Protein backbone atom coordinates (compact mmCIF):
# COMPACT_ATOMS: atom_id res chain seq x y z
CA UNK A 1 0.00 0.00 0.00
CA UNK A 2 1.16 3.49 -0.80
CA UNK A 3 1.00 6.39 1.60
CA UNK A 4 0.72 9.96 0.44
CA UNK A 5 3.30 12.32 1.87
CA UNK A 6 3.66 15.97 0.92
CA UNK A 7 6.69 17.10 2.89
CA UNK A 8 7.47 20.71 2.12
CA UNK A 9 4.12 21.46 0.50
CA UNK A 10 2.46 24.68 1.72
CA UNK A 11 0.18 24.14 4.69
CA UNK A 12 -2.87 25.92 3.37
CA UNK A 13 -6.51 25.29 4.15
CA UNK A 14 -7.07 24.75 0.37
CA UNK A 15 -5.04 21.54 0.45
CA UNK A 16 -7.19 19.98 3.14
CA UNK A 17 -9.20 17.04 1.88
CA UNK A 18 -12.76 17.17 3.12
CA UNK A 19 -14.30 13.95 4.38
CA UNK A 20 -16.63 12.25 1.95
CA UNK A 21 -19.84 10.55 3.10
CA UNK A 22 -19.61 8.21 0.08
CA UNK A 23 -16.28 6.73 1.17
CA UNK A 24 -15.87 3.77 3.52
CA UNK A 25 -12.71 4.79 5.39
CA UNK A 26 -10.37 2.19 6.85
CA UNK A 27 -10.07 4.28 9.99
CA UNK A 28 -11.91 7.31 11.32
CA UNK A 29 -10.26 9.10 14.23
CA UNK A 30 -12.54 11.21 16.43
CA UNK A 31 -10.71 14.04 18.23
CA UNK A 32 -7.95 16.54 17.50
CA UNK A 33 -5.63 16.43 20.52
CA UNK A 34 -2.22 14.77 20.91
CA UNK A 35 -3.71 11.24 20.83
CA UNK A 36 -5.69 11.89 17.62
CA UNK A 37 -2.94 13.70 15.75
CA UNK A 38 -0.36 11.03 16.56
CA UNK A 39 -2.83 8.31 15.54
CA UNK A 40 -3.40 10.19 12.27
CA UNK A 41 0.32 10.24 11.41
CA UNK A 42 0.65 6.52 12.17
CA UNK A 43 -2.42 5.59 10.11
CA UNK A 44 -1.31 7.68 7.13
CA UNK A 45 2.21 6.21 7.25
CA UNK A 46 0.63 2.73 7.18
CA UNK A 47 -1.22 3.72 4.01
CA UNK A 48 -4.74 3.14 5.28
CA UNK A 49 -7.46 5.55 4.19
CA UNK A 50 -8.06 7.79 7.18
CA UNK A 51 -10.55 10.43 8.21
CA UNK A 52 -10.24 12.80 11.17
CA UNK A 53 -13.29 14.37 12.78
CA UNK A 54 -12.64 17.00 15.40
CA UNK A 55 -14.11 20.05 17.07
CA UNK A 56 -10.65 21.69 17.12
CA UNK A 57 -6.92 21.06 16.66
CA UNK A 58 -4.80 20.79 19.79
CA UNK A 59 -7.38 19.83 22.41
CA UNK A 60 -6.20 20.66 25.92
CA UNK A 61 -2.82 21.70 24.54
CA UNK A 62 -4.46 24.95 23.47
CA UNK A 63 -5.22 25.67 27.16
CA UNK A 64 -1.69 24.93 28.32
CA UNK A 65 0.74 27.81 28.78
CA UNK A 66 4.06 26.00 28.69
CA UNK A 67 5.07 22.39 28.28
CA UNK A 68 8.38 21.29 29.75
CA UNK A 69 7.93 17.52 29.74
CA UNK A 70 7.37 16.58 26.10
CA UNK A 71 10.55 14.97 24.81
CA UNK A 72 12.45 16.91 22.18
CA UNK A 73 11.39 20.28 23.60
CA UNK A 74 12.75 21.41 26.94
CA UNK A 75 10.33 24.35 26.75
CA UNK A 76 7.49 25.03 24.30
CA UNK A 77 4.12 26.74 24.57
CA UNK A 78 1.05 24.53 24.34
CA UNK A 79 -0.14 26.39 21.24
CA UNK A 80 3.24 25.99 19.49
CA UNK A 81 3.33 22.27 20.24
CA UNK A 82 -0.25 21.89 18.95
CA UNK A 83 0.76 23.71 15.75
CA UNK A 84 3.75 21.41 15.31
CA UNK A 85 1.50 18.35 15.68
CA UNK A 86 -0.96 19.83 13.20
CA UNK A 87 1.80 20.63 10.67
CA UNK A 88 3.04 17.06 10.90
CA UNK A 89 -0.46 15.72 10.19
CA UNK A 90 -0.92 18.14 7.30
CA UNK A 91 2.09 16.64 5.52
CA UNK A 92 -0.30 13.84 4.58
CA UNK A 93 -3.41 14.00 2.43
CA UNK A 94 -5.69 13.08 5.28
CA UNK A 95 -9.43 13.70 5.00
CA UNK A 96 -10.57 16.08 7.72
CA UNK A 97 -13.90 17.28 9.10
CA UNK A 98 -12.90 20.02 11.57
CA UNK A 99 -15.12 22.25 13.64
CA UNK A 100 -17.47 19.25 13.81
CA UNK A 101 -18.77 17.36 16.81
CA UNK A 102 -19.43 13.61 16.77
CA UNK A 103 -22.76 13.11 18.51
CA UNK A 104 -23.39 9.40 18.00
CA UNK A 105 -21.43 6.33 17.01
CA UNK A 106 -23.04 3.18 15.64
CA UNK A 107 -21.47 -0.24 15.33
CA UNK A 108 -22.92 -2.59 12.71
CA UNK A 109 -21.47 -4.20 9.60
CA UNK A 110 -19.60 -0.91 9.34
CA UNK A 111 -19.01 1.83 11.93
CA UNK A 112 -20.91 5.09 11.50
CA UNK A 113 -20.03 8.45 13.08
CA UNK A 114 -22.90 10.93 13.13
CA UNK A 115 -22.08 14.64 13.43
CA UNK A 116 -23.91 17.59 14.93
CA UNK A 117 -24.58 19.04 11.46
CA UNK A 118 -26.57 15.94 10.42
CA UNK A 119 -23.81 14.43 8.28
CA UNK A 120 -22.50 10.89 8.83
CA UNK A 121 -19.26 9.12 7.88
CA UNK A 122 -18.51 5.39 7.61
CA UNK A 123 -15.44 3.38 8.51
CA UNK A 124 -14.19 -0.15 9.05
CA UNK A 125 -12.61 0.85 12.34
CA UNK A 126 -12.68 3.82 14.72
CA UNK A 127 -10.25 5.43 17.12
CA UNK A 128 -11.93 7.51 19.81
CA UNK A 129 -9.65 10.20 21.30
CA UNK A 130 -12.15 12.76 22.55
CA UNK A 131 -10.18 13.66 25.69
CA UNK A 132 -11.57 15.55 28.63
CA UNK A 133 -13.32 18.87 29.27
CA UNK A 134 -13.63 21.13 32.30
CA UNK A 135 -16.10 19.92 34.90
CA UNK A 136 -19.00 22.26 35.63
CA UNK A 137 -19.91 23.47 39.13
CA UNK A 138 -23.61 23.08 38.49
CA UNK A 139 -24.70 26.17 40.43
CA UNK A 140 -27.23 28.85 39.41
CA UNK A 141 -25.70 31.52 37.16
CA UNK A 142 -22.86 29.34 35.87
CA UNK A 143 -24.23 28.56 32.41
CA UNK A 144 -25.90 31.96 31.93
CA UNK A 145 -22.69 33.88 32.75
CA UNK A 146 -20.16 31.64 31.00
CA UNK A 147 -17.95 33.89 28.88
CA UNK A 148 -19.26 36.90 30.82
CA UNK A 149 -17.12 36.46 33.92
CA UNK A 150 -17.39 32.70 34.35
CA UNK A 151 -14.24 31.09 32.89
CA UNK A 152 -12.59 27.68 32.81
CA UNK A 153 -9.15 28.53 31.42
CA UNK A 154 -6.88 31.05 33.14
CA UNK A 155 -4.30 30.72 30.38
CA UNK A 156 -6.91 31.87 27.87
CA UNK A 157 -8.85 34.41 29.92
CA UNK A 158 -6.73 35.72 32.84
CA UNK A 159 -5.65 38.88 30.94
CA UNK A 160 -9.31 39.98 30.83
CA UNK A 161 -9.26 40.28 34.62
CA UNK A 162 -6.27 42.61 35.09
CA UNK A 163 -6.96 44.92 38.05
CA UNK A 164 -10.18 43.04 38.93
CA UNK A 165 -11.33 40.87 41.82
CA UNK A 166 -11.75 37.18 41.05
CA UNK A 167 -12.59 33.85 42.65
CA UNK A 168 -10.82 30.61 41.73
CA UNK A 169 -12.70 27.43 42.61
CA UNK A 170 -10.44 24.45 43.33
CA UNK A 171 -7.25 23.94 45.30
CA UNK A 172 -5.62 21.28 43.12
CA UNK A 173 -2.84 21.86 40.56
CA UNK A 174 -5.10 23.50 37.96
CA UNK A 175 -6.74 25.77 40.54
CA UNK A 176 -3.50 26.94 42.10
CA UNK A 177 -1.77 27.38 38.73
CA UNK A 178 -4.69 29.57 37.69
CA UNK A 179 -4.63 31.47 40.99
CA UNK A 180 -0.91 32.21 40.48
CA UNK A 181 -1.49 33.47 36.92
CA UNK A 182 -4.34 35.66 38.14
CA UNK A 183 -2.57 36.94 41.28
CA UNK A 184 0.10 38.46 39.02
CA UNK A 185 -2.42 40.81 37.40
CA UNK A 186 -5.69 40.85 39.35
CA UNK A 187 -6.44 43.19 42.27
CA UNK A 188 -7.38 40.24 44.48
CA UNK A 189 -7.80 36.47 44.15
CA UNK A 190 -9.94 34.35 46.49
CA UNK A 191 -9.38 30.59 46.26
CA UNK A 192 -12.38 28.52 47.32
CA UNK A 193 -11.33 25.04 48.39
CA UNK A 194 -13.82 22.31 49.32
CA UNK A 195 -11.26 20.46 51.47
CA UNK A 196 -9.40 21.57 54.65
CA UNK A 197 -6.11 21.90 52.70
CA UNK A 198 -4.81 22.67 49.22
CA UNK A 199 -4.06 19.53 47.24
CA UNK A 200 -1.78 21.13 44.64
CA UNK A 201 1.91 20.18 44.47
CA UNK A 202 4.02 21.81 47.23
CA UNK A 203 6.02 23.84 44.72
CA UNK A 204 2.81 25.47 43.43
CA UNK A 205 1.40 26.08 46.91
CA UNK A 206 4.66 27.80 47.94
CA UNK A 207 4.58 30.01 44.85
CA UNK A 208 0.92 30.89 45.47
CA UNK A 209 1.45 31.68 49.15
CA UNK A 210 4.15 34.20 48.25
CA UNK A 211 1.45 36.57 46.89
CA UNK A 212 -0.07 39.14 49.26
CA UNK A 213 -3.25 39.83 47.26
CA UNK A 214 -4.87 36.43 47.86
CA UNK A 215 -7.24 34.78 50.34
CA UNK A 216 -7.91 31.05 50.68
CA UNK A 217 -11.27 29.86 52.01
CA UNK A 218 -10.88 26.26 53.17
CA UNK A 219 -13.92 24.00 53.48
CA UNK A 220 -16.06 26.43 51.51
CA UNK A 221 -18.19 25.96 48.39
CA UNK A 222 -19.75 28.22 45.79
CA UNK A 223 -23.56 28.24 45.96
CA UNK A 224 -24.47 30.79 43.28
CA UNK A 225 -22.95 33.13 40.71
CA UNK A 226 -24.86 36.41 40.52
CA UNK A 227 -24.98 39.00 37.72
CA UNK A 228 -27.24 40.46 35.07
CA UNK A 229 -24.93 41.13 32.09
CA UNK A 230 -21.67 40.02 33.71
CA UNK A 231 -20.58 38.43 37.00
CA UNK A 232 -21.18 40.83 39.92
CA UNK A 233 -20.83 38.59 42.97
CA UNK A 234 -20.48 35.01 44.17
CA UNK A 235 -22.29 33.44 47.10
CA UNK A 236 -19.99 31.17 49.10
CA UNK A 237 -20.98 28.80 51.92
CA UNK A 238 -18.79 27.80 54.85
CA UNK A 239 -19.22 24.00 54.92
CA UNK A 240 -18.44 23.86 58.65
CA UNK A 241 -20.72 26.63 59.97
CA UNK A 242 -23.21 26.76 57.09
CA UNK A 243 -22.83 30.57 56.87
CA UNK A 244 -23.26 32.03 53.38
CA UNK A 245 -21.35 35.20 52.43
CA UNK A 246 -21.49 37.34 49.29
CA UNK A 247 -18.20 38.30 47.60
CA UNK A 248 -18.22 41.11 45.06
CA UNK A 249 -16.04 39.95 42.17
CA UNK A 250 -15.94 40.41 38.41
CA UNK A 251 -14.77 36.92 37.54
CA UNK A 252 -14.83 33.31 38.65
CA UNK A 253 -12.49 30.62 37.34
CA UNK A 254 -13.77 27.07 37.78
CA UNK A 255 -10.91 24.60 38.13
CA UNK A 256 -12.47 21.51 39.69
CA UNK A 257 -11.23 18.86 37.33
CA UNK A 258 -12.07 17.34 33.99
CA UNK A 259 -14.73 14.94 32.74
CA UNK A 260 -14.21 12.50 29.86
CA UNK A 261 -16.00 13.41 26.61
CA UNK A 262 -17.95 10.21 26.02
CA UNK A 263 -21.41 11.43 25.01
CA UNK A 264 -21.11 9.92 21.53
CA UNK A 265 -20.19 6.45 22.84
CA UNK A 266 -22.43 6.16 25.91
CA UNK A 267 -24.35 2.89 25.80
CA UNK A 268 -22.00 1.54 23.12
CA UNK A 269 -18.63 1.31 24.85
CA UNK A 270 -17.87 0.05 28.33
CA UNK A 271 -16.93 2.89 30.69
CA UNK A 272 -15.19 2.63 34.08
CA UNK A 273 -16.35 4.19 37.37
CA UNK A 274 -14.86 7.56 36.29
CA UNK A 275 -16.77 7.49 33.01
CA UNK A 276 -13.59 6.76 31.03
CA UNK A 277 -13.58 4.29 28.10
CA UNK A 278 -12.13 0.98 29.26
CA UNK A 279 -9.28 -0.17 27.04
CA UNK A 280 -6.81 -3.03 27.19
CA UNK A 281 -3.06 -2.70 26.66
CA UNK A 282 -3.56 -2.54 22.86
CA UNK A 283 -6.18 0.27 23.12
CA UNK A 284 -9.01 -2.16 22.30
CA UNK A 285 -12.47 -1.33 23.67
CA UNK A 286 -15.19 -3.91 24.30
CA UNK A 287 -16.34 -3.55 20.63
CA UNK A 288 -14.13 -5.19 17.96
CA UNK A 289 -12.72 -2.57 15.59
CA UNK A 290 -13.31 0.34 17.96
CA UNK A 291 -10.17 1.58 19.67
CA UNK A 292 -9.62 4.47 22.07
CA UNK A 293 -6.61 6.46 23.26
CA UNK A 294 -5.56 9.34 25.47
CA UNK A 295 -7.29 11.13 28.33
CA UNK A 296 -10.73 9.74 27.47
CA UNK A 297 -9.57 6.23 28.38
CA UNK A 298 -8.97 4.25 31.56
CA UNK A 299 -5.19 4.45 31.02
CA UNK A 300 -3.72 6.17 34.10
CA UNK A 301 -1.75 9.46 34.06
CA UNK A 302 -3.14 12.11 31.77
CA UNK A 303 -0.17 13.59 29.97
CA UNK A 304 0.66 14.69 26.42
CA UNK A 305 3.40 12.13 25.93
CA UNK A 306 1.14 9.35 27.20
CA UNK A 307 -1.78 10.45 24.98
CA UNK A 308 0.56 10.60 21.97
CA UNK A 309 2.01 7.16 22.74
CA UNK A 310 -1.45 5.67 23.20
CA UNK A 311 -2.58 7.31 19.95
CA UNK A 312 0.28 5.58 18.14
CA UNK A 313 -0.64 2.26 19.74
CA UNK A 314 -4.34 2.64 18.86
CA UNK A 315 -3.44 3.38 15.23
CA UNK A 316 -1.24 0.29 14.97
CA UNK A 317 -3.97 -1.82 16.57
CA UNK A 318 -6.55 -0.43 14.13
CA UNK A 319 -4.27 -1.14 11.14
CA UNK A 320 -3.69 -4.68 12.38
CA UNK A 321 -7.47 -5.15 12.77
CA UNK A 322 -8.12 -3.95 9.22
CA UNK A 323 -5.48 -6.31 7.79
CA UNK A 324 -6.92 -9.24 9.71
CA UNK A 325 -10.52 -8.48 8.71
CA UNK A 326 -9.82 -7.96 4.98
C1 LIG B 1 -4.19 23.54 31.87
C2 LIG B 1 -3.56 22.23 31.46
C3 LIG B 1 -2.17 22.11 31.49
C4 LIG B 1 -1.58 20.89 31.12
N1 LIG B 1 -0.21 20.82 31.15
C5 LIG B 1 0.40 19.67 30.73
C6 LIG B 1 1.82 19.59 30.69
O1 LIG B 1 2.55 20.54 31.00
N2 LIG B 1 2.37 18.41 30.28
C7 LIG B 1 1.62 17.33 29.91
O2 LIG B 1 2.19 16.30 29.53
N3 LIG B 1 0.27 17.38 29.95
C8 LIG B 1 -0.37 18.52 30.35
N4 LIG B 1 -1.73 18.59 30.37
C9 LIG B 1 -2.51 17.38 30.00
C10 LIG B 1 -2.54 17.19 28.47
O3 LIG B 1 -2.90 18.38 27.85
C11 LIG B 1 -3.52 16.06 28.13
O4 LIG B 1 -3.11 14.88 28.79
C12 LIG B 1 -3.57 15.80 26.62
O5 LIG B 1 -3.91 16.96 25.90
C13 LIG B 1 -4.58 14.69 26.31
O6 LIG B 1 -4.65 14.53 24.92
P1 LIG B 1 -5.91 13.81 24.23
O7 LIG B 1 -5.63 13.84 22.77
O8 LIG B 1 -6.16 12.52 24.87
O9 LIG B 1 -7.17 14.71 24.59
P2 LIG B 1 -7.49 16.26 24.48
O10 LIG B 1 -6.26 17.08 24.46
O11 LIG B 1 -8.51 16.52 25.54
O12 LIG B 1 -8.16 16.40 23.03
C14 LIG B 1 -9.47 15.92 22.79
C15 LIG B 1 -9.89 16.36 21.40
O13 LIG B 1 -11.12 15.75 21.06
C16 LIG B 1 -12.01 16.74 20.53
N5 LIG B 1 -13.38 16.30 20.83
C17 LIG B 1 -13.95 16.10 22.03
N6 LIG B 1 -15.22 15.64 21.89
C18 LIG B 1 -15.43 15.55 20.55
C19 LIG B 1 -16.55 15.14 19.76
N7 LIG B 1 -17.69 14.71 20.30
N8 LIG B 1 -16.43 15.20 18.41
C20 LIG B 1 -15.28 15.62 17.81
N9 LIG B 1 -14.19 16.01 18.52
C21 LIG B 1 -14.27 15.97 19.87
C22 LIG B 1 -11.61 18.01 21.25
O14 LIG B 1 -12.06 19.17 20.53
C23 LIG B 1 -10.09 17.86 21.24
O15 LIG B 1 -9.55 18.25 20.00
C24 LIG B 1 -2.37 19.78 30.72
C25 LIG B 1 -3.77 19.91 30.68
C26 LIG B 1 -4.36 21.12 31.03
C27 LIG B 1 -5.86 21.27 30.97
Image (tube, helix red, strand yellow):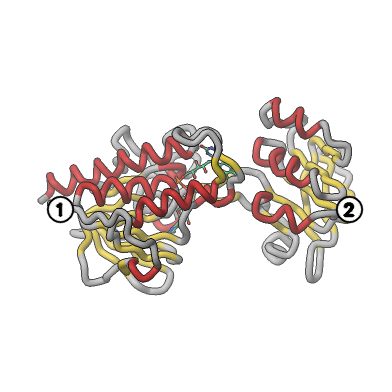
Between label 1 and label 2, give the one nearer the viewer: 1
Residue shown at 85% from the left, 58% from the top: 233
Which quarter of the picture shows residue 218? top right
Which quarter of the picture shows residue 221? top right
Residue 203: % across, % down? 70, 27
Of 73 and 60, the residue lying toward us = 73
Residue 107 appearing in the image: no
Marker disc for residue 30: none
Location of residue 16 with respect to 257 vertically, above or below: below
Which element carries disc 1, helix, strand or loop? loop
| Disc 1 within 8 angstroms of ligand 1 (CB) | no
Please state if 164 lies on the left or on the right of 294 as rendered. right
* Crowding near the residue tagged with mark 2, few <14, some 14–19, many ≥20 C-alpha atoms within 10 Å: some
Please state if 297 lies on the left or on the right of 111 as rendered. right
Residue 23 appearing in the image: yes
Q: Of the residues under marks 1 and 2, which one precedes in the sequence?
A: 1
Which element carries disc 2, helix, strand or loop? strand
Residue shown at 32% from the left, 55% from the top: 8
Residue 191: % across, % down? 79, 42
* Crowding near the residue tagged with mark 1, few <14, some 14–19, many ≥20 C-alpha atoms within 10 Å: few
Marker disc for residue 2: 1
Residue 11: % across, % down? 38, 61
- Between the residue at mark 1 and the residue at mark 2, the CA separation in whole angstroms equals 65 Å
What residue sits right under mark 2 in the picture? 246
Location of residue 304 with respect to 229 vertically, above or below: above
Residue found at the far front of this picture: 8
Do the residues under discs 1 and 2 have CB atoms within 8 angstroms? no
Of 236 and 35, the residue lying toward us = 35
Amino acid sequence: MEFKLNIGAPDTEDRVLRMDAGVLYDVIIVGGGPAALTAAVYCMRKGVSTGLITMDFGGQLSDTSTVENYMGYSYITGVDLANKFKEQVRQFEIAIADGKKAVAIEDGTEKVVRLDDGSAFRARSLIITTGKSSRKLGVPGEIELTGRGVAYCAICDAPLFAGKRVVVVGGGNSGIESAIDLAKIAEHVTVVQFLPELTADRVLVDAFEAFTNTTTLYEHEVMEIVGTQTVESVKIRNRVTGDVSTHEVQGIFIEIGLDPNTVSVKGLLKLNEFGEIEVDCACRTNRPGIFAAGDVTSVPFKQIIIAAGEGAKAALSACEYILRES
